[in-house]
């Protein structure tokens, strides 16, 4: 959407008023990561957008990953980081540095920018107020030679197991925007680093959020011709998983969305980290910047239905 013309600005404001009424009092969980975490201009834009949403009565929760910061900080140290099945293995050697990067450097940078934009932000890790109880990630992979399944040890890489809702309920009645790093501990108080997508999905599911928005490098889903799919149902998205156009990265994002929908989230969105004001365009206009997946098993013709008006 081009905001340079008066008519376009007027249409945006008209759409926004209707959407704000609908979202006021609802919870929206947003996950931010990737290259956006090393781009200060994009961080500043996101901060202003979150403050705007919060001022409209929308309870915004921001979950962040480490993005490209991981490679930068480990390249400057003597600590090696390995990958298994696309996941960074967290060992005793790199656990403390990873937690410092997430809960210290990145978290406080985001908090600062939201405060500079006029908001009230508080930074948390999943450890604070026992917000996120984690458990060790367990996966298996099949050996190429023997075809035997082997358990993969990801070290201190975990998955969210339980979300403490009390702290969120307190903040929902305040001007606070919580900013959460994906670090938690298990029942024995062992620290675990978690995937930010999984954390955002777990929080959205537990809080029965209206929206889960994943800001990704690739943006929304595209069909075989490379055209953006602006909306689809949960049923259509499940079928779309079988499409040959999906790579492993996009498939993981789609699985995160479907998991949240399965657990009661009203709708999920995949939007591009490179789209300026992407969150506002996705939430407050009908000219979406990404893909919305609506929580229904019914199949509709996406060209003929206004998903925002569907109840």
Image (tube, helix red, strand yellow):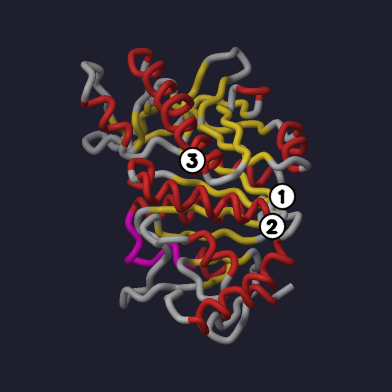
At a point 49% along the width and 52% down the height, the residue shown is: 214
Residue 232 within the magenta-colored segment of the rendering = no
Which is nearer the eye, 191 or 243? Answer: 191
The earlier-in-sequence mark between 1 and 2 is: 2
Q: Judge whether residue 198 can be spotted in this image.
A: no
Say if 144 sits above or below 98 in the image: below
Point out the image quarter for the C terminus.
bottom right
Point out the image quarter for the N terminus.
bottom left
- Sort mark 3 into few (<14), some (14-19) or many (20+) by Cα contacts within 10 Å: some
Secondary structure under the numbered disc 1 in the rendered image: loop
- Sort mark 2 into few (<14), some (14-19) or many (20+) by Cα contacts within 10 Å: some
Q: Which residue is mark 1?
A: 208
Residue 122 locus on image (x, y percent): 60, 32
Start and end of the magenta stretch? 239-247
At a point 70% along the width and 75% down the height, the residue shown is: 310
Is 83 situated left or right of 231 in this image? Answer: left
Is 210 situated left or right of 246 in this image? Answer: right
Q: Nearer the viewer, mark 1 or mark 2?
A: 2
At a point 63% along the width and 52% down the height, the residue shown is: 28
- Sort mark 1 into few (<14), some (14-19) or many (20+) by Cα contacts within 10 Å: some
Secondary structure under the numbered disc 2 in the rendered image: loop
Q: Which residue is mark 3?
A: 113
Residue 241 within the magenta-colored segment of the rendering = yes
Tell me the number on the disc at residue 56.
Answer: 2
Secondary structure under the numbered disc 3 in the rendered image: helix
């Amino acid at each position: 959407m081009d905001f340079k013309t008066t008519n376009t600005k007027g249409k945006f404001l008209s759409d926004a008023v209707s959407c704000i009424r609908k979202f006021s009092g609802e919870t929206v969980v947003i996950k931010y990561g990737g290259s956006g975490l090393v781009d200060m201009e994009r961080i500043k834009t996101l901060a202003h957008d979150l403050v705007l949403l919060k001022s409209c009565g929308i309870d915004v929760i921001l979950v962040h990953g480490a993005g490209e910061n991981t490679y930068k900080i480990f390249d400057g140290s003597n600590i090696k980081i390995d990958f298994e099945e696309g996941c960074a293995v967290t060992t005793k050697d790199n656990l403390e540095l990873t937690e410092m990067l997430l809960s210290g450097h990145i978290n406080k940078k985001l908090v600062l920018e939201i405060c500079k934009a006029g908001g009230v932000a508080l930074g948390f890790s999943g450890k604070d107020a026992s917000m996120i109880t984690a458990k060790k990630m367990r996966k298996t992979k099949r050996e190429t030679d023997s075809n035997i399944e082997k358990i993969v040890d990801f070290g201190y890489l975990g998955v969210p197991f339980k979300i403490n809702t009390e702290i969120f309920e307190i903040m929902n009645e305040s001007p606070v925007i919580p900013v959460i790093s994906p670090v938690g501990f298990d029942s024995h108080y062992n620290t675990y680093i978690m995937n930010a997508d999984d954390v955002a999905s777990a929080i959205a599911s537990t809080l029965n959020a209206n929206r889960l928005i994943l800001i990704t490098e690739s943006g929304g889903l595209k069909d075989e011709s490379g055209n953006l799919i602006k909306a689809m149902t949960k049923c259509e998205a499940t079928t779309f998983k079988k499409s040959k156009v999906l790579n492993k990265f996009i498939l993981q994002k789609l699985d995160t969305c479907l998991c949240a929908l399965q657990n009661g989230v009203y709708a999920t969105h995949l939007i591009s980290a490179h789209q300026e004001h992407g969150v506002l365009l996705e939430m407050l206009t009908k000219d979406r910047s990404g893909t919305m997946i609506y929580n229904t098993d019914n199949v509709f013709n996406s060209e003929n239905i206004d998903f925002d008006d569907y109840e």
